[in-house]
Image: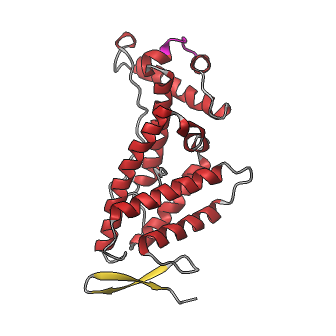
Amino acid sequence: MATTQASMATGQTTKATRPASKVKPSQADGVGSSRGDRAGARILDAAIAELIESDGALEVAAVARRAGVSVGLPYRYFGTRSGLLVAVVESFYDRLDAAVLHHVFPGKTWQERERVRTAAWVEFLFREPLAPIVLGRLARDAAVAGVELSRLDRAIESGARNIARGQADGDLPPGRDPHLLAAAVLGGMRTSVAFALMWTSRPSRRRITEELWAFVLGSVTGAATPSGRVTTTRAAGKASPRPDTSG
């Protein structure tokens, strides 16, 4: 996950604020000027609205009309149509990372924290109108695919640290490679949610969250119970999966 840019992808780090849109005005527009920043942000917002309304199609001229600027100005800020698409996708993942990836969730154990993170990840993607476009149609664009790969790499690194911390704390079984686990979890989650977002009649957020959490838990522990919980026994600083039989 790519989703992914989601969930399972970080330890307890400092909560991030929503990053500002990445806009690069040219010298002609005044680098760093407040007017230039506002114009770039307006173009980016117009591109997002255009993508949502046109189900992923994007014409620079239409974006310029919507933003109330000349047709040439988007090119000055973003270089090409692909550059504008990349800025949109980067903005999307910045928001996702702030809401989920870098957010500090409550809980005494890895399982408690990451179950909440999974729910937050699903909530963000189901609420965000750009999500099915970024995870679906735009993912086929070569420039956007590069952003997806870069974001996934970052998420896997964060996820590996998070899983390793859970192993060290005794919340997760030791001896399994954190990077492989993070890659499997994030890739599976992203693909699953992207598929669900394309359905005409979407499953409920609760159902998707429960299904994904069972998948995550089974992936990192190797065993999941019908209730979606795994308990661990601690001995000599190690944890081993033990099915929950509490009923």
Question: In the rendered view, does 32 fall on the left or right side of 202?
Answer: left
| Residue at (55, 53) in percent of width and height | 191
The colour scheme used here is: secondary structure
| Quadrant hosting residue 62 | top right
- Vertical side of 169 occupied by 9: above or below: above
* Residue 231 percent across, percent down from the top left: 44, 82
Q: How many marks?
A: 0
Question: In the rendered view, does 28 fall on the left or right side of 225?
Answer: left
Could you tell me what secondary structure mostly forms the magenta stretch?
Answer: loop
* Residue 74 percent across, percent down from the top left: 49, 18
| Residue at (52, 58) in percent of width and height | 189
Which residue reaches farthest right?
Answer: 201
Q: Which residues are magenta?
A: 68-73
Task: Determine if the magenta segment contains residue 72.
Answer: yes
Residue nearest the observer in this picture, 183 or 158:
183
* Residue 139 percent across, percent down from the top left: 53, 40
* Residue 173 percent across, percent down from the top left: 36, 77
Which residue reaches farthest left?
Answer: 236
Which image quarter holds the C terminus?
bottom right
- Vertical side of 217 occupied by 83: above or below: above
| Residue at (26, 82) in percent of width and height | 237
- Vertical side of 220 occupied by 14: above or below: above
Residue 113 visible, this angle? yes
Residue 11 visible, this angle? no
